[in-house]
Every structure is written in structure tokens, then in C-alpha cells.
Image (cartoon, rainbow, N blue to C red):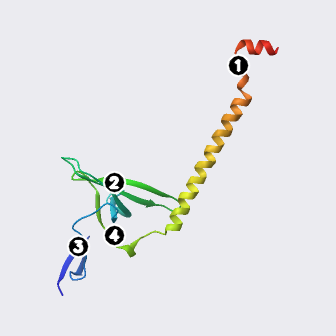
Amino acid sequence: MEKRIVEINGVKLEVDLTTARVVESYRVGDNVKVLIKKYGDSFESHPGVIVGFDPFVNRPTIVIAFLETGYNSAEIKFVHLNADTKDCEICPMIEKEFPFDKARVEGMFNRHIGAAEAALAEAKNKKAYFLAEFGSYFKAPEEVAAKS
């Protein structure tokens, strides 16, 4: 058994290299963890997926979509990882390691869609009311005179 000592934030861990998994390459569709700097010196880890590689000449970039969940919200955000990206890292995510419940996140998106649809319906109703009730303000003078 080959073991190595790894120190993470002052905590020393002994890792068995015979069972540790090393990823040397990423592909589009790979599940990853995205470590993003938040406030001060704090970082948050989010589940993500590699959605593309941009082969720019000077700054090849990995495009990653990640899921940021809150108490009652879910939001998909993007990070573009290249040589100049600061305060962001990725690492592979093991299949059994997903830190969210699909049904819960889907429910959050459905509630957001419902609220957006209700706001759209309200805006359409206000427009219809405006056109029906305030339409006389915008009639041509000859139309107003003909009705008098």
C-alpha cells in the first residue's frame, strides 16, 4: 500500500494512493465540484458540469455550469476557468457524491417559473386594462368629434 500525507487547511490526511483516483483530463459532460471564493476568505463548493472548452489561442478556457442553491432558490451560474481565473478551482465529483436532491431543485425551478408566469399574466392584464380604459386619450381628434 502506497500512502501519501496531504495537508488541507492545516489538517493532515493520509491518502492511500492505490485507491485514490487521479483525473488527468476532463471532457464535456464531466461532473465536477467548483470551489468559488465568497466573502472574505470563505469558499463554497458547488456541483457543476463541464459544458464546453473554448480553444482560444492565448487563454484556453473551460466553461463550467454550476448549481448554486439557497434556502428556497436554485440558480445555474457559469464560470470560465483559464490561466487568469482567480478564486476558483475545480476537481472531479464522484457519482455518489451529489450534494442536492433533484426533485427539490426541480421544485424550486418550477416555483420560479410559476412566479414568472404569474408576473407575465399580470403585465398582460395591465396592458389590456390600459388599452381598454385609457384608449380614448389616444384617439384622433376627428374620432372624438364624430362621437360627440
**Circle 3 sits on which residue?**
22
Q: Amino acid at mark 4?
A: Met
Image disc number at residue 93? 4
Calculate the distance from the C-alpha at mark 3 to the C-alpha at mark 2: 23 Å
- Residue 98 percent across, percent down from the top left: 41, 71
Crowding at label 4, few (<14), some or many (≥20) Cα neighbours within 10 Å?
Answer: some
Residues under numbered marks 3 and 2 in contact, where contact means CB atoms less than 8 Å apart: no
Q: Which residue is found at the position 73% from the left and 22% from the top?
A: 136
Mark sitting earlier along the chain (3/2): 3
Depth check, mark 3 against mark 2: the one in front is: 3
Q: Amino acid at mark 1?
A: Lys
Calculate the distance from the C-alpha at mark 2 to the C-alpha at mark 1: 52 Å
**Circle 1 sits on which residue?**
139
- Residue 28 percent across, percent down from the top left: 32, 60
**Circle 2 sits on which residue?**
79
Q: Which residue is found at the position 56% from the left and 62% from the top?
A: 107
Mark sitting earlier along the chain (2/1): 2
Calculate the distance from the C-alpha at mark 1 to the C-alpha at mark 3: 73 Å
Q: Amino acid at mark 2?
A: Val
Crowding at label 3, few (<14), some or many (≥20) Cα neighbours within 10 Å?
Answer: few
